[in-house]
């Protein structure tokens, strides 16, 4: 009780002569808001407001040119019952997630493991492996990718199978590889996670006669599982939203035979090319709900396989 | 003190919001370079058309020293997509080339300027009234046709001669065409033509040859899933036999001649519009010729003369008068006509057409002779396609991709298309 009676700026009042180090709480909050204002404004104007508008538009027939008319659930009904291409794009996206995410995480982990014990040139290799993440997001690399995998391209010359991007069975893999190649971000996070694992755990394991593989399975994986979980959630969310590589590799069409028509590419096509912004908004909201659900499921399963070191202390 | 800070916060917030708004609004309209009026003019086409357009634009700039024209062009597919984005973003070019399919949507969507507002600068009195009307929506002129075109079977003359396949004559039917394709494939070892199954245009010609149409008068589908199944079964069989291009080739089509099987040396014929077929000359060194599209089995012609493309002015242009002057120049100036020839189809300005007909040379003459040979034998063109057709053209390709990659039967894909088309035309 006594503490609450003392006014908050008490320390400052006790010694008024030197420059007050702490300002009143309210005043400090004001300063915080001023510094936060660009972000807050951005969040409201560029994220929350457009989200609200898009939710509204998803119940309209907005075509970008004429004022929207309320159509109730028609967009959602059409999506689920009258649009076979929609379901194909859902299936394509799920396939993509299942291919790209494990491949990318595995590659990031392998490279991080290799880099961990490297004595010389670690900085160089770390940068070199990270570089594709900076380059890969650019359109130019995606175009190079298209040339590589096109018929008459490098892959065609090496394997002699006419390239990948004109074959529906292979084109999605070419897109996925472009993403997998950009494994820099999860790699750096894995590397940080690996360096947190205390060396004595490995020493103890070695004394107990554990080989390299056994150490990896019994020490590295459990100790790294929180980081692995973090990367898994992040990369899964990103994979559901994949757009640029699919757009660039298929020249914006999602072909051949819709094999690279991932969800967001179809959404873009409906919204901007076919001018059905209402429909596209509805698609966006369904995607948001699905990503939310998938993330929730991941969190639920995490209880059984993610190990937090602090739990061991209990 | 706190109050003071809050005010500061509000002020900075307001300033930031204002910046955001200003940034959003900036960029449209007033663009001047060195005191000159700058116009943006965009079109689709092949390199030949681009070179000639640049020449014509240079002449325009000479005549109008206060105007600078920024041009840009691309293949049709890329152009269509880019223009859609620009139009919806309120950033349509000052002067733009338009397809028949885009007029309705962009006119009713307030993307195009009502040309009645600039009729003193942009003269249309020498254009055939019927043709001019194709650029009218709800009684207002929103676009002016720039040329008259029709579809053609463009073929590699030498390859056909070497294979011993007779040159196609007027009135040949789809089954004769199919036989020729088989024969060519057998003799040359290459598919005869691009698989026409993916082309809504080719389907329309086939459909009209049977007395039907893509769309009814009240803008609904003019054909059934059975019609489309029959067409796709026909092309699917030819593709399986190797008489037309395989799916891997067909899927690379992007509206440019360079990426067609004929242009890539992988086939000996193609379907295209007559004027842009000039682009094949640079790619098929032995020369190409134009033949009429195949007719229905009873000889009913399916192809028709249509405005090959239009010119329109952006509704939000900062310089409607200058933009109108450029459109007027491209349509009515004799100097421009001499440079442009038939690169966008046969000119619509009657005086220019009759005046330049005798001077046309090279491929322009080929196109002109081709159209003359069809004159009077074709049926009336259909009314302007509904705005949904712009998107359906792509849907058509995509659904046929499912057939050509053997992921669906022609019937299944045709049913899908009809479902999608009905939804598209309803909205």
Image (spheres, rainbow, N blue to C red):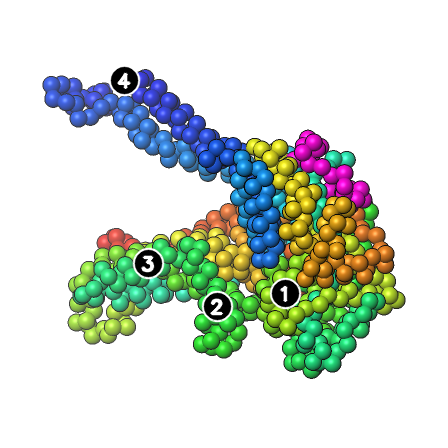
Q: Nearer the viewer, mark 3 or mark 4?
A: 3
Residue A163 position (above or below residue A137): below
Q: Residues within 10 Å of mark 4 (few under 14, many from 20)?
A: few
State which quadrant residue B134 falls in.
top right
Q: Is disc 4 placed on a helix, strand or loop?
A: loop
Q: Is disc 2 placed on a helix, strand or loop?
A: helix
According to the picture, the residue beneath numbered tag 2 turns out to be A149
Label 4 resides on the chain identified as B
Discs 3, 4 touching: Cβ within 8 Å: no
Q: Residues within 10 Å of mark 1 (few under 14, many from 20)?
A: many
According to the picture, the residue beneath numbered tag 1 turns out to be B280
Q: Which mark is residue A200?
A: none
Q: Residues within 10 Å of mark 3 (few under 14, many from 20)?
A: some
Residue B68 position (above or below residue A306): above
Residue B158 in sight in this render: yes
Label 2 resides on the chain identified as A
According to the picture, the residue beneath numbered tag 3 turns out to be A131
Label 1 resides on the chain identified as B
Residue most extreme to the bottom: B187
Residue at (55% x, 68% y) in the render: A166
Q: CA distance from mark 3 to mark 1?
A: 42 Å
Q: Quadrant of the N terminus of chain A?
A: top left
């Amino acid at each position: 009780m006594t503490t609450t009676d003392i006014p908050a700026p008490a320390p400052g009042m006790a010694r008024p002569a030197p420059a007050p180090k702490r300002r009143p709480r309210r005043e400090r909050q004001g300063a915080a808001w001023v510094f936060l204002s660009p972000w807050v404004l951005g969040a409201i104007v560029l994220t929350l407001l457009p989200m609200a508008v898009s939710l509204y538009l998803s119940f309209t027939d907005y075509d970008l040119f004429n004022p929207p008319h309320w159509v109730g659930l028609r967009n959602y009904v059409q999506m689920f019952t009258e649009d076979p291409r929609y379901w194909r794009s859902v299936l394509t996206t799920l396939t993509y997630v299942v291919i790209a995410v494990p491949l990318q995480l595995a590659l990031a982990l392998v490279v991080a493991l290799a880099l961990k014990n490297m004595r010389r040139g670690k900085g160089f290799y770390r940068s070199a492996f990270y570089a594709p993440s900076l380059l890969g997001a650019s359109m130019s690399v995606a175009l190079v990718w298209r040339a590589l995998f096109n018929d008459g391209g490098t892959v065609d010359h090496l394997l002699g199978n006419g390239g990948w991007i004109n074959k529906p069975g292979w084109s999605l893999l070419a897109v996925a590889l472009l993403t997998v190649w950009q494994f820099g971000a999860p790699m750096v996070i894995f590397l940080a996670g690996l360096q947190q694992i205390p060396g004595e755990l490995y020493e103890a394991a070695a004394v107990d006669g554990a080989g390299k593989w056994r150490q990896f399975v019994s020490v590295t994986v459990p100790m790294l599982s929180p980081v692995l979980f973090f990367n898994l959630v992040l990369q899964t969310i990103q994979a559901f939203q994949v757009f640029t590589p699919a757009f660039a590799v298929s020249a914006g069409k999602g072909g051949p035979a819709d094999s690279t028509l991932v969800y967001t590419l179809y959404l873009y096509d409906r919204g901007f090319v076919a001018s059905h912004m209402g429909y596209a908004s509805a698609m966006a909201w369904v995607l948001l709900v699905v990503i939310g659900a998938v993330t929730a499921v991941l969190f639920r399963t995490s209880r059984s396989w993610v190990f937090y070191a602090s739990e061991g202390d209990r | 003190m706190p109050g003071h800070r809050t005010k500061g916060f509000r002020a900075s917030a307001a300033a930031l919001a204002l910046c955001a708004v200003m940034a959003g609004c900036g960029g449209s309209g007033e663009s001047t370079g060195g005191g000159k009026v700058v116009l943006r003019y965009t079109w689709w086409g092949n390199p030949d058309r681009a070179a000639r357009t640049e020449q014509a634009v240079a002449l325009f700039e000479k005549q109008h020293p206060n105007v600078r024209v920024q041009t840009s062009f691309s293949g049709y597919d890329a152009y269509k997509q880019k223009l859609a984005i620009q139009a919806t973003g309120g950033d349509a070019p000052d002067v733009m080339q338009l397809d028949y399919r885009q007029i309705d949507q962009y006119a009713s969507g307030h993307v195009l300027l009502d040309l009645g507002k600039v009729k003193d600068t942009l003269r249309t009195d020498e254009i055939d009234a019927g043709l001019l009307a194709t650029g009218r929506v709800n009684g207002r002129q929103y676009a002016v046709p720039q040329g008259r075109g029709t579809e053609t079977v463009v073929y590699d003359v030498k390859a056909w001669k070497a294979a011993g396949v007779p040159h196609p004559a007027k009135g040949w039917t789809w089954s004769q065409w199919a036989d020729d394709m088989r024969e060519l494939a057998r003799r040359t070892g290459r598919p005869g033509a691009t698989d026409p199954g993916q082309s809504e245009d080719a389907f329309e010609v086939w459909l009209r040859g049977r007395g039907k149409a893509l769309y009814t008068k009240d803008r609904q589908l003019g054909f059934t899933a059975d019609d489309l199944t029959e067409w796709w079964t026909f092309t699917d069989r030819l593709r399986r036999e190797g008489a037309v291009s395989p799916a891997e080739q067909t899927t690379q089509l992007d509206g440019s001649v360079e990426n067609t099987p004929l242009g890539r040396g992988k086939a000996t014929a193609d379907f295209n519009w007559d004027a842009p077929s000039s682009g094949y000359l640079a790619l098929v060194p032995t020369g190409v010729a134009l033949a009429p599209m195949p007719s229905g089995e009873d000889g009913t012609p399916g192809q028709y003369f249509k405005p090959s493309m239009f010119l329109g002015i952006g509704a939000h242009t900062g310089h409607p008068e200058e933009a109108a002057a450029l459109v007027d120049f491209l349509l009515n100036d004799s100097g421009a006509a001499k440079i442009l020839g038939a690169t966008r189809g046969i000119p619509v300005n009657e005086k220019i057409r009759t005046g330049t007909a005798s001077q046309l040379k090279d491929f322009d003459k080929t196109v002109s002779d081709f159209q003359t040979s069809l004159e009077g034998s074709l049926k009336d063109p259909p009314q302007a396609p509904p705005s949904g057709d712009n998107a359906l053209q792509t849907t058509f390709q995509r659904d046929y991709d499912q057939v050509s990659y053997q992921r669906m039967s022609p019937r299944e894909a045709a049913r899908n298309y009809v479902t999608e088309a009905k939804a598209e035309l309803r909205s």
